[in-house]
Amino acid sequence: MTVDAPARPRWRAARAAVLLAVFVCAACGLVYELALVALGSYLIGDAVGQASIVLGVMVFAMGVGALVAKPLQSRAAAAFAAIELTLALLGGLSVLGLYAAFAWLDLYGPALVGTAFVLGLLIGAEIPLLMVMLQRIREQSAGSAVADLFAADYVGALLGGLAFPFLLMPVFGQLKGALVVGAVNAVAGVALVLTVFRDELGRRARVGLCAGSVVVGLLLGYAWVTAGDFEVTARQQLYRDPVVHAERSRYQEIVLTRSVREVGHADTDLRLFLNGDLQFSSVDEYRYHEALVHPAMRGPHGDVLVLGAGDGLAAREILKYPDVRSVTLVDLDPAVVSLARSEPQLRDLNRRSLTDPRVRVLNLDAFGWLRTATQRFDVVIADLPDPDETATAKLYTVEFYSLVRPVLAPGGRLVVQSGSPYFAPRSYWSIERSVREAGFATVPYHVDVPSFGDWGFVLAAPGGTAPELALPADVPPLRFLTPAVLAAAATFPADRGRVDVPASTLLQPRVLEYAREEWRGY
């Protein structure tokens, strides 16, 4: 119904208010989608898969929501207000609820699909109702009304897309950021109805709307106040040992746990987890890092490049050689490096390697840095996170290892941590194949690291002659690795011999597929 002879400034202001509500609601809706994708990426590690599930389910549900809204158009203003309050509450609490489902109930997958569907359903009902509300202010052609609404909707989505990574995540974090957006969503929807469309509501509807607003506000406020305690409790549920440090950097969730071992040991077990994946246990990390570093140090090793290893433990082993002139460490996340420099027990474990004057730390993406690097190195150590995510899979490709070749000095060697040949044989041998196809001659080997199990590496040199798998003549005293142990490391048992699998490339990241399949359930 068209408003009778409204004054031009009045209907223009009302129309602007509706379009502003469209703008804000669109921004909030996109933030809810991004929050679900980001949470899944942190908890599950499959960014592409999580985005596909969330976006696919939500877009489908939005179509359903548009149909569901048709019977509500006769009471568009009241229905819109109710939908916005429901959306604000569920969207605001979505991250909290999904985190709880992951930590306590082991129902994250079904909970994600259900949450995405309900939020999409509510978001899809918004536009049809707002179209009716806009036409009640002043009738206009359907084409013009749709153009106005979708212009505001798309621009609002742009704001939400930019605000999520650059404002909400850095300032509030995922959990509180969703609560803030829920509150904004509720205010935008209720304010529009109680001002522009107040006359369309009966007294009982206005009282109900105000009461609903108070309830939603109280619930979001309570969640805000208790968010810190909830996050600490839920996070601790995910780890066996007490969490002593936790932060969510721009790139990943960083958790440090510490406990005193009970079975025959008095050692403190310090463990670092990135996005839930164990990076090391202080009880046996020396086995891993000795096997990673020292075979590659046989030969010239004045200048060493380390890709990853922001914890400083690989650098610790390198610096045991007094003739090392420089160590360049390229690690994407400055938060990991900062923790390795500041946390007392971790700093003692890495022997303050990252403050050694010979060590230069670059917080850059290894792939991008290698494309422009000009310095030559005697040794390159690739100690990178496992290729079970899209972002890390590119660091295990033919293209990546091809970028390593130009930075190696004559006689230089490359060593790559390559996962477990026992638990993930296809992943391991695909990495070895990728190194070979990049023009290296390789020597695969593996050792036992109790915290990880059977763990493998690939030692390589450019050209057709593989490097010798042996310890340097000037090797420092080691706790685990001996010439006999290293010689045995090159032998693989019959049930875990070489697997003929193709290499991994940027366009066909096979190692990502293998890693997800083989590590599922571990």
Image (cartoon, rainbow, N blue to C red):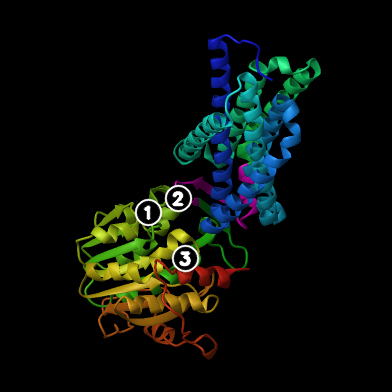
Q: Are marks 2 and 3 in contact (CB under 8 Å)?
A: no
Which residue matches tag 3? 386
Q: Are marks 2 and 1 in contact (CB under 8 Å)?
A: yes
Q: Quadrant of the N terminus?
A: top right
Which residue matches tag 2? 251
For label 3, count other residues whose C-alpha is less than 10 Å away and answer few (under 14), some (14-19) or many (20+).
some
Q: Which element type, helix, strand or loop, lies under badge 2? A: loop
475 sits left or right of 157 in the view: left
Q: CA distance from mark 3 to mark 1?
A: 14 Å
Q: CA distance from mark 2 to mark 3?
A: 15 Å
Residue located at (19% from left, 62% from top): 375
Q: Which element type, helix, strand or loop, lies under badge 3? A: loop
For badge 2, the amino acid type reads: Tyr
Q: Along the polypeptide, which appears first: circle 3 or circle 1?
A: 1
For badge 3, the amino acid type reads: Asp
Report which quarter residue 208 is drawn in: top right
Q: Which element type, helix, strand or loop, lies under badge 1? A: loop
For label 2, count other residues whose C-alpha is less than 10 Å away and answer few (under 14), some (14-19) or many (20+).
few
Q: Are marks 3 and 1 in contact (CB under 8 Å)?
A: no
Residue 266, percent across and down?
56, 62
Residue 357, percent across and down?
24, 54
Which residue matches tag 1? 332
Along the line of sight, the residue nearer the viewer: 497 or 401: 401
Residue 80, percent across and down?
69, 29
For badge 1, the amino acid type reads: Leu
Q: Along the polypeptide, which appears first: circle 2 or circle 1?
A: 2
Which residue range is magenta in the image?
231-253
| The magenta stretch spans residue 289 | no
